[in-house]
Image: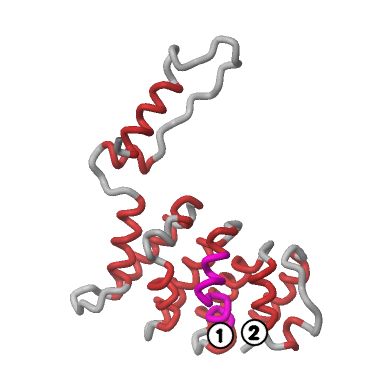
Amino acid sequence: MEPGLNSLLQWGIENSDAGRNPDQPAREPRGLTADVLRSLMGGPSDADLMREAMAIIGSSDPEVTHDAKMTAFDNLEQLVENIDNANNMEPLGLWTPLLAQLESHSADLRRMAAWCIGTAVQNNIKAQERLLALNGIDRLVQVSLDDADKSVRRKAVYALSSGIRNYQPAMNEAVKRLPKDIVGPDQVSAADMDVIDAIMGKLRERE
């Protein structure tokens, strides 16, 4: 059965009198997700929209304008605010092309790439694991320290901050890569928000 139809059937059962147990307290009806509704109505799913956005962002077609790529990046960033969409980036194969945009010739695209990464990994250990596995922490450290554009560096700091919080393996990798005058000589706990805030503050202050 199609996922959308299965979700619709489940919704119908849950919200029908026959689907309710009279011995259990009444529950607030659960709505259909926007993705399911779009699928049922023949519209593109979030997964389709994410793939389309990345195809535009990574296109080498001269007819694809810079503005079109920026719009696609803005759409992608909004989509990955949803944790399910962020977790879907791996099976959709979007992490590698997204990280590649950190090396774009366009500062705007590098900045948007860092922004999308930061949004996708925020409070999301599955995405944090993927970022680390793809050497993303090292790449974000490099951009935070070395990018020629200040706005790109600041977004990379945001992404790095999101990638290491409450995820010790990523924190350990960042500590290895960052200068000692920023992180200090000791190990840093990924749960110590005050220390992480101080480290990120030092990174942002670098010229």
Looking at the image, is 136 positioned above or below residue 128? below
Secondary structure under badge 2?
helix
Residue reaching furthest to the right: 186
Residue corresponding to mark 2: 177
Q: Quadrant of the N terminus?
A: top left
107 or 184, nearer to the observer:
184
Is 123 colored magenta in this rendering? Answer: no
Q: Residue furthest top?
A: 22
Label 2 packing within 10 angstroms: few (<14), some (14-19), many (20+): some
Q: Residue at x 45, y 57 (%)?
A: 80
Q: In this rendering, is residue 169 above or below 86?
A: below
Please state which of the two labelled residues, at mark 2 or mark 1, is closer to the viewer: 2
Report the front residue among 90 and 147: 90
> Are there few (<14), some (14-19), or many (20+) residues within 10 Å of tag 1?
some
**Image x and y of residue 180, in percent:** 74, 87
SS state under label 1: helix
Horizontal side, residue 1 vs residue 83: left or right = left
Per the rendered image, the range of residues in magenta is 129-142
Q: Is residue 114 left or right of residue 168?
A: left
Which residue position is annotated with label 1? 142
Spot the residue most to the front.
Answer: 1
> Magenta: predominant secondary structure element?
helix
**Is the C-beta separation of discs 2 and 1 under 8 Å?**
yes
Where residue 113 appears, as percent x and y from the top left, is 44, 72
